Amino acid sequence: LDKDSTVTDDEFRARITSIEIIQDNNPIDTTKKDYTKTQATLDSQKLVWASQNLATYEFDYTRECSCLPEIQRSKYIQVVDNAISLALYSDDRSEVSANIIAGCPTIDGLFEIIQDAITDENDEIVVTYNTPFGYPETIYLNPKKDVNEDEVTIKVESFTFAVPGDPIPEEPVLGETDIAIKNAQTYLTQAMTLWDSNDFDNYDFQYEHDCFCEAIYHAPKLVSVRNNQIVDVQFLENSELELPDEVPQDVMDQIMDVDGLFDKIQDAIDNKASEVTCTYDEKYGYPTSILLDKDSTVTDDEFRARITSIEIIQDNNPIDTTKKDYTKTQATLDSQKLVWASQNLATYEFDYTRECSCLPEIQRSKYIQVVDNAISLALYSDDRSEVSANIIAGCPTIDGLFEIIQDAITDENDEIVVTYNTPFGYPETIYLNPKKDVNEDEVTIKVESFTFPVPGDPVPGDSVGSDDGRVPGNTTDNVDDGNSSTEPPTESPTESPTSASTHHHMGLAITSSLFLGLWMIVAISGTVTM
């Protein structure tokens, strides 16, 4: 502690180098590790995974350890009805022997590995989980720090799953050794599945094809498809090109419908083209841009094409293809609400900030205290003055934040960007933009310094500290809502995460006759590290 930095030798420095806690006249083991947060995160992510109801899926599995080379080799794993049905080595696509397969886990098996490490009290357990599906993406285990070469690192990559009703794959459709080809196949398969699931037979699209050829070949065109057959092709107006009134037959023969473009991409993948770079529409799956280079050593053999817009025809009427798809946003919200509900927290506190084109009193950061799921106290964070009743009425609880996100989905906001806390599931940041073409209607909400009482402790009473007495927390795990992505600001701890966790929020100056006694606070950190 340095009371005045302009004065020398007035600092207070102290350390507690060890401690022995006495309970019932006996010392307790203070070196015993606390796996509470690791267990809570595991439990919450298992809930997220279970909510997906996925029994058939595939992924690439790698285990790094001091073990046989065959165990360490990366493997393609196919799971059907929650059991491994196929395992191939990723490098040469050769089959994995039965005794090696026996040591390969499903996703549920990965959760069991983490649980065993907690039960066995491993010295280090570091796990990252996928959002929004909840499965472990990386697992690092170190059973004993003082034992060499007993660490294990597990990686899960290229996770994909079967759409309900689709036939189970008889063999993997991934490439052999080329990672780019493997990814291209994964994206193509997902896009084709999405397109086929809509069963579109009639549509019009604007098509552009780049080539080293005459203008009539690469001029923008409107292509009409009926009953999955191209029935008409017209040139789009273009003042820079002299085009005939009708598209010549040899030009029409070069044009493909959506299924034909998928076949073109698949052919390039099957023949291991030097480059396969494609983008697909997130809502319907059709290719929006295609670049295929059969042989990088040959010039001018690339195939480039774009679908710049599409109109789907159903029951002889066009449907609105610009309508936004909130499926992933809704799924993420639903899964995180499940995680939050599983905590059974009715009493907690947090700092709440709302950035908007609104009154200064609404924008000022506030300390919010919730008891029995209702706001019991609200103070401005800067001067600890009480917030007026009409402003409190606009402040949400955590459940209220979920309702704000749901309303934005229901109202079809143009932008919805949310990050959720791990392991507790509450929203940490919410960015909403109802209409991109309307200025100053955006809203940003931040939740910080979330804490809750340890079960059985009394409700918080008065505490004293300098300023607001808080040590910044450390929240690192985020969930992308699926409509757009952003990196939320991350605070840098002023001391180690351990000390931040134990001293967080102990310096609040609060006076309220409702809250008496001493409150032990557990601070929430998104980092899953032992």
Image (tube, rainbow, N blue to C red):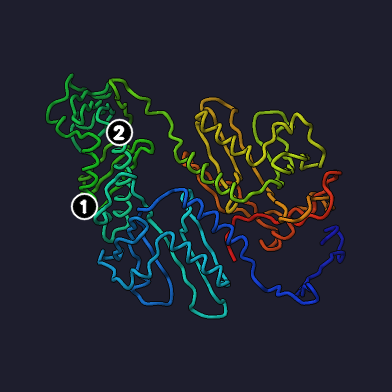
Is 280 situated left or right of 469 in this image? left
The numbered dot on residue 323 is: none
For the residue labelled by badge 1, is the local secondary structure a helix, a strand or a loop? helix
Q: Residue at x 59, y 44 (%)?
A: 427
Q: Residue 25's quadrant in the figure?
A: bottom right
Q: CA distance from mark 2 to mark 1?
A: 23 Å
Q: Residue 224's quadrant in the figure?
A: top left
What is the x, y in percent for residue 223? 23, 27
Q: Is residue 103 above or below residue 437?
A: below
Is 3 situated left or right of 271 in this image? right
Q: Are marks 2 and 1 in contact (CB under 8 Å)?
A: no
Kind of residue sitting beneath label 1: Asp
Q: Residue at x 83, y 50 (%)?
A: 461
Which residue lies most toward the left here?
A: 250
* Quadrant showing the C terminus: bottom right
* Quadrant showing the N terminus: bottom right
For the residue labelled by badge 2, is the local secondary structure a helix, a strand or a loop? strand
Q: Residue 399's quadrant in the figure?
A: top right
Give the mark nearest the N terminus, 2 or 1.
Answer: 1
The numbered dot on residue 307 is: 2
Kind of residue sitting beneath label 2: Ile
Residue receiving disc 1:
270
The residue carrying pointer 1 sits among few (fewer than 14), some (14 to 19) or many (20 or more) residues within 10 Å by Cα, namely few
Q: Residue at x 76, y 55 (%)?
A: 457
What is the x, y in percent for residue 181? 29, 54
